[in-house]
C-alpha cells in the first residue's frame, strides 16, 4: 500500500495556509507557532529549520523532539473523521495539528487549545 500523499507534502507548503487560516480570524502567526511547538516539542529555531529545509510531513513528525503527552486529549472531527479514532499514528498526528489550528481559527482560548 502506498503512502497517503499528504505525508509526502512539504510542511513548508502547508504552514503558510495554517497562518492564513488563523489570520483570517484575527489570530496570529505566533499563536500558530505556539500550537505547533506545543504539539511537537520543536522550539522556534527547530520549527524554522524544518520549514527552511523543506521537510515533508512524515519527516517533520518523525523528527519532532517530543510529541506532547496531552495530545491524546485532542478530540473531535476533522474532515469528517473523529481524530481519536484514526488508526494510522502519522495521520492521527497530522489531524491533531489540523484540529488545533481549526480550534484557533474558531476563536477558542489558547489554554483550552493547549489542553491546560
Image (cartoon, grey):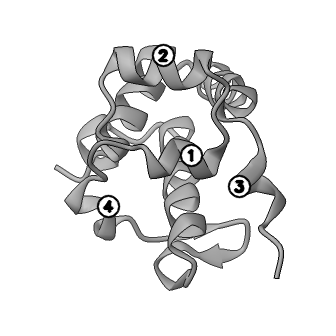
Say if mark 4 contacts mark 2, CB within 8 Å.
no
Instruction: Classify the position of the N terminus by image quarter.
Output: bottom right
Viewer-closest of 69 and 61? 61
Left or right: residue 66 compared with residue 107: left
Tell me what residue is drawn at x 56 percent, y 36 percent: 105
Q: Give coordinates of residue 60: x percent, y percent.
A: 53, 42
Residue named by callout 1: 59
- Neighbor class of circle 3 (other Cα within 10 Å; few <14, some 14-19, many 20+) is some
- Neighbor class of circle 4 (other Cα within 10 Å; few <14, some 14-19, many 20+) is some
Tell me how far mark 2 sits from mark 3, CA to CA: 19 Å
Tell me how far mark 1 sits from mark 4, CA to CA: 19 Å
Badge 2 element: helix
Say if mark 1 contacts mark 4, CB within 8 Å.
no
Tell me what residue is drawn at x 77 percent, y 68 percent: 3
Tell me what residue is drawn at x 28 percent, y 45 percent: 114
Question: Which badge, 4 or 2, is on the more N-terminal residue?
Answer: 2
Tell me how far mark 2 sits from mark 1, CA to CA: 14 Å
Residue named by callout 4: 71
Residue named by callout 2: 48
Q: Nearer the viewer, mark 3 or mark 1?
A: 1
Question: Which badge, 2 or 1, is on the more N-terminal residue?
Answer: 2
Q: Give coordinates of residue 41: x percent, y percent.
A: 29, 39
Tell me how far mark 4 sits from mark 2, CA to CA: 22 Å
Residue 18 can be seen, yes or no: yes
Question: Which badge, 4 or 3, is on the more N-terminal residue?
Answer: 3
Instruction: From this view, report whether residue 44 is shown above or below residue 65.
Output: above
Residue named by callout 3: 7
Amino acid at each position: 500500500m502506498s503512502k497517503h500523499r499528504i505525508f509526502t507534502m512539504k510542511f513548508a507548503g502547508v504552514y503558510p495556509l495554517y497562518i492564513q487560516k488563523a489570520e483570517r480570524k484575527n489570530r496570529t502567526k505566533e499563536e500558530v507557532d505556539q500550537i505547533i511547538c506545543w504539539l511537537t516539542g520543536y522550539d522556534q529555531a527547530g520549527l524554522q529549520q524544518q520549514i527552511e529545509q523543506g521537510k515533508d510531513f512524515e519527516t517533520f513528525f518523525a523528527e519532532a523532539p517530543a510529541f506532547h503527552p496531552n495530545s491524546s486529549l485532542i478530540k473531535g472531527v476533522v474532515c469528517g473523521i473523529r481524530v481519536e479514532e484514526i488508526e494510522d499514528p502519522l495521520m492521527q498526528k497530522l489531524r491533531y495539528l489540523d484540529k488545533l489550528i481549526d480550534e484557533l481559527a474558531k476563536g477558542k482560548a489558547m489554554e483550552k487549545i493547549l489542553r491546560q
